[in-house]
Image: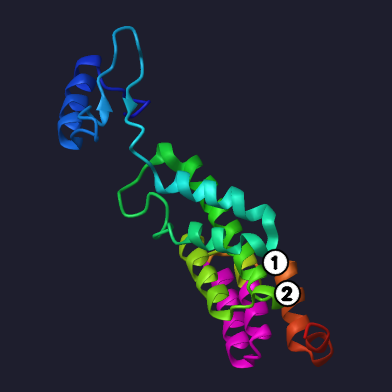
Amino acid sequence: MDPVNPWTPSTMDTHMSRLRRRLGVDSAGIPYLRPKPKGVEQYSLSDEITCDYANFEHLAERGLPQGAAGVLDLEAALRLVRGKPFGGAGAHTWAAPLVQTMNTKIVTVAHTIAFQRIQDEVLDIDAARHAISTGLDVEPAAEVLYRDWMRVEHRAGNPVALRQVIAQVRQMAAEMGFDDVQDKTEQLIQQLTTSRGAAKLR
């Protein structure tokens, strides 16, 4: 499985046979892991095998262009996220590009939910907070989500929570070794913590 040190064909066949037995058969009695036909290089899986991330992508692609009307699809997508992609299963260097893509899409969905859920049309402060929390579990350095969180607490009229979020984003930046928070983040902090700026955003 490691492209740097690939298995021999016989080792691959042995492992695939074991895996086929462990996975069992589908509703038609055919192995979930299909035997490789002669002359075919790749193994295949039953169509009955699905992946949470494929379902996530489907829901996200359907929900993202729809604005407020798509927020339920986006929340359904985010409910499929349980921690960091490939997390807790050891190092998978081959999966690093996939993980980055998945993280980016998850953050995008969380950000969009947070943005929509502070609009009057579909206002739900708790749903916005939950989306942000899920996104930050996946990508703790996503400042866009901290900015969303500040807007959520401002929309909720909770200045104490707003100050706590500001402290957290500054602490995150320091722990990550950044010189400071991003300019967009600093500008938003100034807007939300000055009486004139705060009034404009009400």
On the image, the x and y values in percent for residue 122 come to 64, 73
Badge 2, how many Cα within 10 Å: few under 14, some, many 20+? Answer: some
Q: Is residue 124 visible?
A: yes
Image-quadrant location for residue 195: bottom right
* Identity of the residue furthest to the front in this view: 28
Residue 182 as seen in the image, left or right of residue 38: right
On the image, the x and y values in percent for residue 143 come to 62, 66
Residue 71 as seen in the image, left or right of residue 45: right
The front one of 19 and 164 is 19
Say what secondary structure mark 2 lies in.
Answer: helix
Q: Are marks 2 and 1 in contact (CB under 8 Å)?
A: yes
User: What amino acid is labelled 2 in the image?
Assistant: Glu
On screen, residue 2 above or below 193: above
Badge 1, how many Cα within 10 Å: few under 14, some, many 20+? Answer: few
On screen, residue 199 above or below 18: below
On screen, residue 120 above or below 105: below
On the image, the x and y values in percent for residue 17 come to 17, 25
Residue shown at 38%/49% (left/top)?
A: 86
Q: Which residue is mark 1?
A: 182
Of the 4 image quadrants, the one containing the C terminus is: bottom right
Residue range (magenta):
148-175
Q: Is residue 180 visible?
A: no
What's the distance in space between the residues labelled 2 and 1, CA to CA?
6 Å
